[in-house]
Amino acid sequence: MTTRNYDILVWGATGFTGSRLVEYLALNAPAGTRVAIGGRNRSKIEAVRAKLAAKHPMAPISLASMDILIGDSQNAQDMHAIASQTRVVASTVGPYSIYGEQLVRACVEEVTDCCDITAEVPWVHDMNRELNDQAVRNNVHIVSLCGFDCIPADLGCLMLAQYSREHIQQPLLHVKGSIVGIRGGVSGGTMATLGNQLGIEARRLWKGVKAQMSGSSTPQSQPPNGKETNRAVVHYDQTLGRWQGFWVMSMINSMATKWAGRELNYGPGFSYAETMTARNVFMAIAQTLGFVYLAALMFFSATRNLLYMLRAIPRPGEGPSDKFMKSGFFSLHLEAFSETEVFYGKVSGSSDPGYSETIKYLGESALCLAFDRDESFRPGIYPPSVAIGNKLLDRLRNRGCQFDVARKIIPASHDSAKKVQ
């Protein structure tokens, strides 16, 4: 790689997540890290830079001196000019199926690593099919799915697969995830991406919903110790002693973890299923229907626009307050099945999962690509576990993220998560 002007470029610095990623890197990147910020509107980026510089005048990485790069995400020439100046791009500009393709192409061709927080797994698969061979030849790492969807499930399954291989000497066959506690907000960018994906992937998503409802997305083989893994989405979890309902990210996390399982050879037919804990069967049914109802409202442009008009959902660029994000948390319980054993994992975070934790995940992914590269990294277009797995896992643990595995159920380490156990 030729000498670059910058170590990391934050692309989409004026967005709700992008501006906070700039702040995270200024406060947490190693001294001397060269960070640039970019987007399509110079005056808005300058305003973000000035606001953050006034908020953190003594930040280890000077915010006031960060260079600004301008470009249009859908203009191939702009994306090449930007990608050629930096070693790593951290992109927060979505929906990625609309605004991400030219950046990925430019990064592959300019030999620039890239990470993003898309949850658009079908789009990532498309980029992999079309550009992966070239990315491997160029030794480029395009690491997608670096947000709350899908880091906890993706790295959680990597952790469990390695434990099963090293301590049980058996392949990992199935993981059942359950969100046992969560508090977090949602931004307008997330809602815009949801609306776009529902339009593009309606048939595929509906097939996924039907599979989740029927339980056909989980393995049909006999599980160990008589444990039942082929369950409908609304069911009573005997291990947790709690009712389970549909979880909005379950299909995304299932696709990502199965993909990683194939690439990293977790075990024959490895599968992942995920639900959300409810207080009782009625709440489990209600939350499941609520997610389906919201998806229906977001699918149609007329009802989606009505929700915006009524301020029922935030517009792009809007999101929860800093105070609310600091009060957030999540706790993900994992039950893992090898050929003869059942063991457990826990992944948790002590702030808003969709934003504070996501910003941490993306920031550490960018720093990992910039400074931790070694022979364990796998070039290509892949989920985090495949591309930079253990190095990123170490970074996140060092930043206070809980990733634990044991033979018995593990309580969450964060006080906020313990409240919902």
Image (cartoon, rainbow, N blue to C red):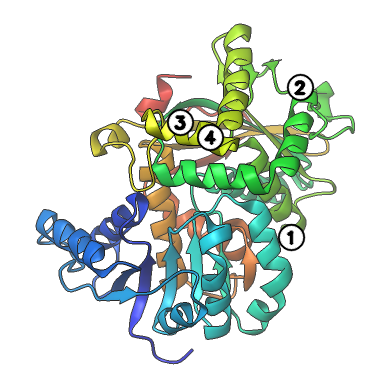
Instruction: Give neighbour class at mark 3: few <14, some 14-19, many 20+ (Cα, 10 Å).
Output: some
Nearer the observer, disc 4 or disc 1? 4
Inter-mark Cα distance, 4 to 1: 41 Å
The disc, 1 or 3, on the residue closer to the chain's N-terminal end is 1
Q: Which residue occupies 75% across, 25% down? A: 213
Q: Is residue 253 left or right of residue 35?
A: right
First in sequence: mark 2 vs mark 3 = 2
Q: Which of pointers 2 and 1 lies earlier in the amino acid sequence?
A: 2
Q: Work out whether mark 2 precedes mark 4 in sequence or the reverse, and give the earlier one.
A: 2
Q: In the image shown, does 279 or 110 lie closer to the viewer?
A: 110
Residue at point 60%, 57% (across, down):
385
Instruction: Determine the secondary structure under disc 2.
Output: loop
Could you tell me which secondary element the residue under label 3 belongs to?
helix
Above or below residue 417? Residue 44 is below
Q: Nearer the viewer, residue 272 or 295?
A: 295
Question: Residue 140 location in percent, x, y?
Answer: 57, 77
Circle 2 residue? 232
Q: Which residue is mark 4?
A: 302
Q: CA distance from mark 2 to mark 3?
A: 33 Å
Marks 2 and 1, how far apart in space?
A: 27 Å
Q: Earlier in the sequence, mark 4 or mark 1?
A: 1
- Residue indicated by mark 1: 263
**Which residue type does callout 1 highlight?**
Glu
